[in-house]
Image: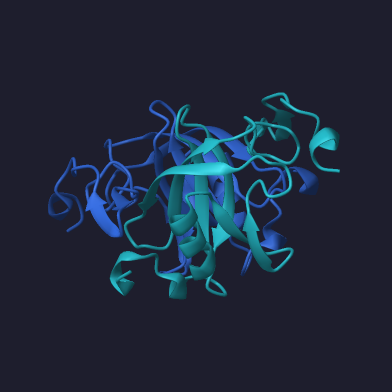
Chain colours: A cyan, B blue
Amino acid sequence: MSPDIKPNFAKGWNGLLPAIAQDAESGQVLMLAWMNLEAWEATVQGGRAVYWSRSRNKLWQKGEQSGHYQQVREIFLDCDSDTILLKVHQQGKAACHTGHVSCFYRKWHNGRLIEAEQPVFNPESVYC
Amino acid sequence: MSPDIKPNFAKGWNGLLPAIAQDAESGQVLMLAWMNLEAWEATVQGGRAVYWSRSRNKLWQKGEQSGHYQQVREIFLDCDSDTILLKVHQQGKAACHTGHVSCFYRKWHNGRLIEAEQPVFNPESVYC
């Protein structure tokens, strides 16, 4: 892979760039996670979204615990090559470990946060 | 505003969290920029998207130069309160300084980047 056609990981803090996962069918923004070069290459080569877990400090294939893998349909880079957009098919219908389709299930409304969507699975039955 | 219902800016590098702007009508992901507490408060209070420019190291109301403001329709927080999602009405039709509707106009395809959409304005006529 030519160095000029991949994300510019040198621009990220600790080599990490934000990667947005968007549902390829519905257009819903599902989550944001982080990629380094290693995660990018694993994603491109394997066809499933692989991120870098900042809390566990290791590569993290989304769904490795839950089975809710993200099949990558398309990959976009932004104009200055420091943000990645993945259009994915979300297996198991939900991306969030809380059981919600999207991690962005809380809406800011008049100074409060309200739950804008209901969970579609019980996290205790998936993450045990 | 209660401290527990705003983004957790302490989790960001230098107090900055990623903020995704999504077109409220089309669902297209337009751009990703960065917010600190000051940018968040300006956005919430003013109703237009305000980010923190890392290159200029100052608050940046999107559109202040181009006139392409982003009217905020809805604001979502992710499950761990460290990413912001804005659903916006994009004035001037395009968010990207290159004249493209979305900053994510380049698609990764078989190891190459291809331009997946055409610009809708000439940047030289907007940014002068």
- Image quadrant holding the N terminus of chain A, namely bottom left
Q: Is residue B75 above or below residue A62?
A: above
Determine which quarter of the picture holds residue A77: bottom left
Instruction: Name the residue located 14 percent from the left edge and 48 percent from the top edge.
Output: B122
The percent coordinates of residue A60 (x first, y second) are 65, 58
**Looking at the image, can residue A53 be seen?**
no
Q: Is residue B54 above or below residue A28?
A: below
Instruction: Name the residue located 23 percent from the left edge and 42 percent from the top edge.
Output: B117
User: From the viewer's perspective, is A76 left or right of A128?
Assistant: left
Foreground residue among B73 and B11: B11
Instruction: Name the residue located 56 percent from the left edge and 56 percent from the top edge.
Output: A50
Q: Is residue B84 above or below residue B12?
A: above
Determine which quarter of the picture holds residue B44: top right
- How many marks the image carries: the answer is 0
The percent coordinates of residue B25 (x first, y second) are 40, 25
The percent coordinates of residue B119 (x first, y second) are 19, 44
User: From the viewer's perspective, is B14 left or right of A74?
Assistant: right
Instruction: Name the residue located 19 percent from the left edge and 50 percent from the top edge.
Output: B126
Determine which quarter of the picture holds residue A98: top right
**Looking at the image, can residue A27 be seen?**
yes
Foreground residue among A111 and A106: A106
- Image quadrant holding the C terminus of chain A, namely top right
The percent coordinates of residue A49 (x first, y second) are 54, 51
User: From the viewer's perspective, is B91 left or right of B10?
Assistant: left
User: From the viewer's perspective, is A71 left or right of A65?
Assistant: left
